[in-house]
Amino acid sequence: MSTNEVMARLEAAVSALGDVDVSAWPEDSLREQLGQLSTALVALDAALSRVADGVRARGLRIEEPVSA
């Protein structure tokens, strides 16, 4: 997979997550989905950490973009 494809997929993932608003979920739905949500969040955290660690291992820093 090319770097452009990877970046497009990462941007799509960020966009999809931007649409998630658990505060709008009914309490019962959140309780029903909590196990699945927790599993997804832990997997996402591990994947992001792996990518960030790979960047840092190459001697680069991950910085927050400066707002215009």
Image (cartoon, rainbow, N blue to C red):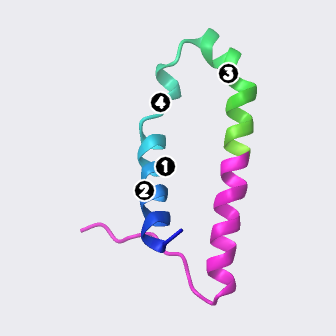
Q: Distance between the residues labelled 1 and 3?
A: 20 Å
Which amino acid type is shown beneath numbered disc 1? Ala
Identity, as a three-letter code, of the amino acid under mark 3: Gln
Q: Earlier in the sequence, mark 1 or mark 3?
A: 1
Q: Which of marks 1 and 4 is nearer the N terminus?
A: 1
Give the total number of marks visible in the rendering. 4
For the residue labelled by badge 4, is the local secondary structure a helix, a strand or a loop?
loop
Q: Magenta region: which residues?
A: 43-68
Dot 3 crowding, Cα within 10 Å, few <14, some 14–19, many 20+: few
Residue that carries the numbered disc 1 in the rendered image: 13
Q: How far apart are marks 1 and 2 (CA)?
A: 5 Å
Q: Which residue lies furthest to the front in this view?
A: 1
Q: In which quarter of the image is the C terminus?
A: bottom left
Mark 4 residue crowding within 10 angstroms, few (<14) / some (14–19) / many (20+): few
List the residue tagged with mark 4.
Answer: 21
Report how far apart the C-alphas of labels 2 and 3 lie in the structure: 25 Å
Residue underneath mark 3:
33
Q: Which quadrant is home to the N terminus?
A: bottom right
* Amino acid type assigned to the residue bearing label 4 in the image: Asp
When the figure is inspected, residue 11 is found, relative to residue 36, above or below; the finding is below
Query: Which of the marked residues, 4 or 2, is nearer the chain's N terminus?
Result: 2
For badge 2, the amino acid type reads Glu
Residue 48 forms part of the magenta stretch: yes
Residue that mark 2 sits on: 11
Apparent side of residue 19 relative to residue 33 in the rendered image (left or right): left
Q: Which of marks 4 and 2 is in front?
A: 2
Q: Do the residues labelled 1 and 2 touch (CB within 8 Å)?
A: yes
Is 31 on the left or on the right of 24, as rendered? right
Mark 4 or mark 3, which is nearer the start of the sequence? 4
In the figure, 36 relative to 62: above or below?
Answer: above
Give me the C-alpha separation between circle 3 and circle 4: 13 Å
